[in-house]
Each structure stands twice: as C-alpha cells, then as structure tokens.
Image: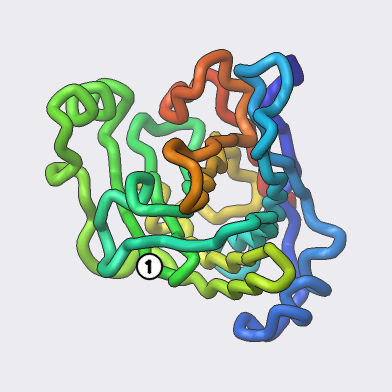
Amino acid sequence: MSPSPRIICRELPSFETSNLDSIRRAFQNSAACELGQPWLRQPEPDFAPAQAHAGWRGGSLLLFVELNDPDIFTRATADNQNFWELGDTFEIFLRPKEQKSYLEVHVAPNNMHLQLRFAGAETAQRVRKAGSFADVLISGEVFQSKTWVLPEARRWFIFADIPAGSVSEKSNPLPGSTWLFSFSRYEYARDRKEPVISSTSSHTIPDFHCQKEWGVMKFAF
C-alpha cells in the first residue's frame, strides 16, 4: 500500500474564481493527489477516478477537484444535511499539525455545504457512536465553493476557498505552516445500492477520521 501523500502547497497566480478554464490554468502546476481505495487489493469495478489540486493565495487554502462520475446526483436540499447518505459528495478534512481540533466540510454537486468541527479524535468517536452530528455542526459560511456539473462528459468539478481562520485556532500565516489533510468521496449511482467510496489517505480500513493515515500538506513561502 502506498503511503499517504505529502504535498507542497504553493502560492497560486491570480485567476477568475468563477471561470473553469481560468481555474484550470492557475492550478496546472500545483500539487495534486489521486483518490483511491487502498483498503482493497484492487479497486471496485465501479470505481471512478478523482484528483484534487491544492494551492494557496492570500489567507486561504484553495482546492480544485476533478471528479469522474457516470451518474452525478444528490438528494440534498439544504446545507448541513447528511450528504453522504443523499448522493455524491466530496469531503475535505483539515487540521493544523499543532492542534487537536479539525474541520470536516463537504461539497455536493449542487454546491451545498456540510460543515463540521471536531474538538479532537475523541469527539468524532462520541458523535459517531451517538449517531448525531448536531453538536459539531457549524452554522454560517466558513468557506466558499463553486461547482460545475457536466453530465455529458461524466465529470464534475469543485473550486473551494477555505480561509485559514476557519481551520486554524491561531492566526499564523499560511507560508511555513504544516497541516494534516484528507480528501474523500462518496460516489453514488441510482442503479447501485451502496456508494463507491475513495480517499487520498492510505486507510487500511475505510475510516476517514483515522488521522494517523492522513496526508501532510506544507505551505511554501
């Protein structure tokens, strides 16, 4: 099994955040990592590839995600629903190396958001056991995103702008910082009962909250 990714997150040039071609050009030389299913000997037959690109600008982590998907859909109708039960969703886990708390956010194809903050690993265990995420939901906007859905090409795209202040408890500048990260995905199809899940992390079992298997992201000066 391959180790989890270690990436250097570099400053990006300016670009139009609402223009897909402009975003592609800005991220063309950025750090990137593939999503896979490392807990399996080989990917499931319905596995669909995805790639996440990372950079920074100003005080934000910027992500551009390209997802192959033969059946793009979600039944989510509002923010902070259980997106992983409602259709396709992309998950972002972020934690500065020196702190215990971490952010988990989701983006659905219709650009709705699920936003969660865990005080630490024990909090994640507690809320999962209780079966309710109400205590860790974040109201209000902690990040911005835009999605493009191209069903004829069987692909969808995400651009996300995540301010460092939404992740870090300290107001440290991004250059020189080190964060742990993981990107994961639930990929549904209407003719399939269970989703195909994947991650950038080297999980031995598909537990996306297992932080010891997350990747490392270093922000370059």
Which residue shows up at 75% across the image and 56% down it? 10
> Which quadrant does the C terminus fall into?
bottom right
Q: Which residue is mark 1?
A: 112
Q: Position of residue 114 (x, y in %)?
A: 33, 56
Which residue shows up at 28% across the image and 49% down it? 82
**Residue 110 as seen in the image, left or right of residue 125:** right
Residue that sits furthest to the right in the current view: 29
Q: In the picture shown, does residue 19 fall above or below 177?
A: below
Q: Nearer the viewer, residue 164 or 187?
A: 187
Which residue shows up at 56% across the image and 42% down it? 183
Q: Position of residue 154 (x, y in %)?
A: 69, 63
Secondary element at image label 1? loop
**Residue 200 as seen in the image, left or right of residue 130:** right
Q: Position of residue 186 (x, y in %)?
A: 49, 44
> Which quadrant does the N terminus fall into?
top right
Q: Is residue 170 visible?
A: no
Give the residue type that dot 1 points to. Met
